[in-house]
């Protein structure tokens, strides 16, 4: 699916912003932000340092489980692996949603249920981060936009530069066309996540859950279609047998 990276980027921005707003600045989609917040809170700024510390092993657990599941598949085709990882992330997203609803209103960052809620969210986004590295397909990173923005700026300079070779401009233009939709989708998802939490709280996580279920079924449909193309038809098999004779 051509828009898959943009959809995943929107999910990452949506969930990351929602968790940041709802759970005392917790980043679920990447751990770099949590390291920065842990450092700040160690100096007496902010709150919820223990939850951010626990988000790291939860994130790692999501990556490890994803790797083990994909490696256990025989055969591990890209569509089968994608379907499985989408299903796992969707299940974790639903648990994240229900856990968040259960702890609302979130008042204490050091509450065990609140910490557990944040850990489930980090595990769900750990699965998405692992997905891009475990499933071989053309695409761009869809959870952290720092590298994408950097590359997009460099490509834009090459495209606009009259001194850049034409072949370099063509490559930069193609890459820029792939990265810009993901960047814009992440930004739109971030805005939507904050607004959705303001209006419906943790129930807003039902939206990424539904989208992930849809992505899982879409990947499963692609696997079925691929299998139909690969499997020889009875007529084709007979023809091949006659040809050998």
Image: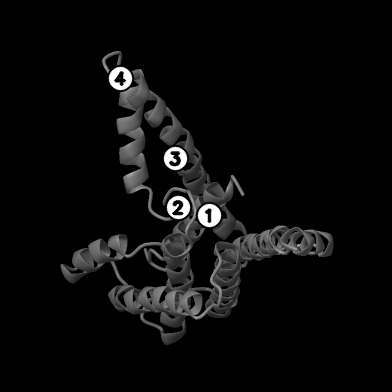
Residue depicted at 72% across the width and 64% down the height: 231
Q: Mark 3 or mark 4, which is nearer the start of the sequence? A: 4
Q: Which mark is residue 67?
A: none
Is disc 3 placed on a helix, strand or loop? helix
C-alpha span from label 1 to label 2? 6 Å
Q: Secondary structure at mark 1?
A: helix
- Mark 4 is surrounded, within 10 Å at the Cα level, by few (under 14), some (14 to 19) or many (20 or more) other residues, namely few
Q: Which residue is mark 1?
A: 8
Cα–Cα gap, marks 4 and 1: 33 Å
Q: Nearer the viewer, residue 21 or 185?
A: 185
Residue 223 x %, y %: 66, 63
Q: Is residue 158 left or right of residue 5?
A: left
Disc assigned to residue 142 = 2
The residue at the point 41 percent across, 51 percent down is 141
Point out the residue furthest to the right here.
235
Secondary element at tag 4: loop
Q: Earlier in the sequence, mark 1 or mark 2?
A: 1
Is residue 45 visible in this depiction of the protein? Answer: no
Q: Which mark is residue 165?
A: 4
Count residues near mark 3 (Cα–Cα under 10 Å), then give few for <14, some for 14-19, many for 20+: many
Identify residue for label 3: 179
Q: Nearer the viewer, mark 2 or mark 4?
A: 4
Looking at the image, is mark 4 or mark 1 nearer the viewer?
4
Q: Position of residue 70 (x, y in %)?
A: 49, 74
Q: Quadrant of the C terminus?
A: bottom right
Pick the residue in front: 115 or 170.
Answer: 170
* Disc 2 to disc 4, C-alpha distance: 29 Å
Q: Who comes first in sequence, dot 4 or dot 1? A: 1
Spatial distance from mark 3 to mark 1, Cα to Cα? 13 Å
Q: Is residue 99 left or right of residue 28?
A: right
Where, by quadrant of the figure, is residue 179 drawn?
Answer: top left
Question: Which numbered disc flags the more N-terminal residue, 3 or 1?
Answer: 1
């Amino acid at each position: 699916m051509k828009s898959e990276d943009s959809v995943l980027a929107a999910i990452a921005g949506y969930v990351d912003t929602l968790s940041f707003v709802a759970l005392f600045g917790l980043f679920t989609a990447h751990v770099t932000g949590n390291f920065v917040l842990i450092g700040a809170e160690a100096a007496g700024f902010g709150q919820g340092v223990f939850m951010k510390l626990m988000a790291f092993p939860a994130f790692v657990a999501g990556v490890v489980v994803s790797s083990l599941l994909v490696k256990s598949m025989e055969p591990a085709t890209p569509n089968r692996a994608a379907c499985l990882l989408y299903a796992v992330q969707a299940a974790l997203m639903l648990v994240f949603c229900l856990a968040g609803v259960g702890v609302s209103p979130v008042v204490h960052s050091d509450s065990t249920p609140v910490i557990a809620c944040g850990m489930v969210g980090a595990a769900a986004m750990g699965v998405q981060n692992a997905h891009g590295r475990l499933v071989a397909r053309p695409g761009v990173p869809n959870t952290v936009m720092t590298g994408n923005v950097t590359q997009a700026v460099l490509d834009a300079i090459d495209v606009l530069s009259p001194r850049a070779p034409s072949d370099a401009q063509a490559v930069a233009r193609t890459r820029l066309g792939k990265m810009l939709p993901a960047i814009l989708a992440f930004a739109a998802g971030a805005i939507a996540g904050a607004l959705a939490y303001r209006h419906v709280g943790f129930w807003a996580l039902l939206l990424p859950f539904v989208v992930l279920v849809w992505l899982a079924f879409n990947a499963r449909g692609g696997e079925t279609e691929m299998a139909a193309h690969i499997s020889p038809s009875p007529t084709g098999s007979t023809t091949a047998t006659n040809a050998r004779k």
